[in-house]
Image (tube, rainbow, N blue to C red):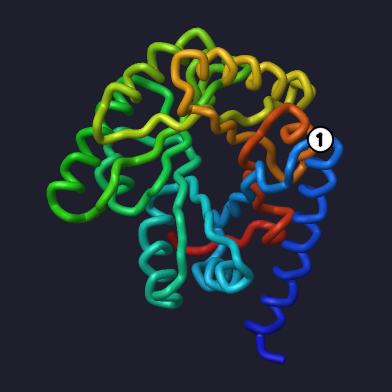
Amino acid sequence: MSEDDERRAELAESLSSIRQRLAAACAAAGRPVADVQLLAVTKTFPARDVALLADLGLVSFAENREQEARPKVAELAALRPAAEARWHMVGQLQRNKARSVARWADVVESADSPRLVEALAGAVRNALDAGERTRPLEVLVQVNLDEAAGRGGCSAAEVPALAADIAARDELRLRGVMAVAPQNTAPDVAFDTLSAISARLRRDHPEAGEISAGMSGDLESAVAHGSTRVRVGTALLGGRRLISP
């Protein structure tokens, strides 16, 4: 068995396990499993792993560093030219990276300031004009659930204004909210808070119904509180592999 075959078998087993967990979590919450998207967090893993996951039927992939994502997106396109792939930016994003992200990302889940929103809108506009992309950028507002200094995300109080800013821009499409459960907060408490923030947002923006919440260790709690997208890395791909950006 080749190295690729071994890795494919390993990933297939992990993917089956994650899908079983998702199915059980949705059943416990009384939700259809189709309601929750699996987003494979491929940071620090090579494009060949992404290609194998695409072979196994996954479509959505996430990165948290622009400088790692950009060459990986190009390499996947070379490895699997016919693969359908949607790329999400889930890490903190500096405004000076907006231009590059606008060339490869389908979704940015980490919008957390008016200045970043402005930079993304301008970058997408330029990318559309240059033929580097063909549609607006989907955007989620990242919420900092414990408002710890230095952590990505805006406060709950800032969500309405930031969401309105995104929704008003032709280059962007407001899709919902994203958050990470703080280490010092029980996941049920964190995701219940995010669910309430999402409900308030949907009153003004019915189209913004996505809740990106839950990772390898707490996806069951997130699904129970309405998550529509879980971001899974370790449980799917294994321990972090360091690769060159």
Q: Name the residue furthest left.
A: 129
Q: Secondary structure at mark 1?
A: loop
Q: Quadrant of the N terminus?
A: bottom right
Q: Is residue 164 left or right of residue 15?
A: left
Q: Residues within 10 Å of mark 1 (few under 14, many from 20)?
A: few
Q: Name the residue furthest top.
A: 157
Task: Give me the residue at 75% from left, 21% from top.
Answer: 185
Task: Give me the residue at 76% from left, 55% from top.
Answer: 18
The image shows residue 110, relative to residue 87, as above or below, that is above
Q: In front: 217, or 243?
A: 217
On the image, the x and y values in percent for residue 64 come to 49, 45
Name the residue beneath numbered marker 1: 30
**Count of marks placed on residues:** 1
Q: In front: 106, or 89?
A: 106
Residue type for callout 1: Gly
Task: Give me the residue at 36% from left, 66% from top.
Answer: 74
On the image, the x and y values in percent for residue 106 come to 39, 48
Q: Is residue 122 left or right of residue 90?
A: left
Q: Quadrant of the C terminus?
A: bottom left
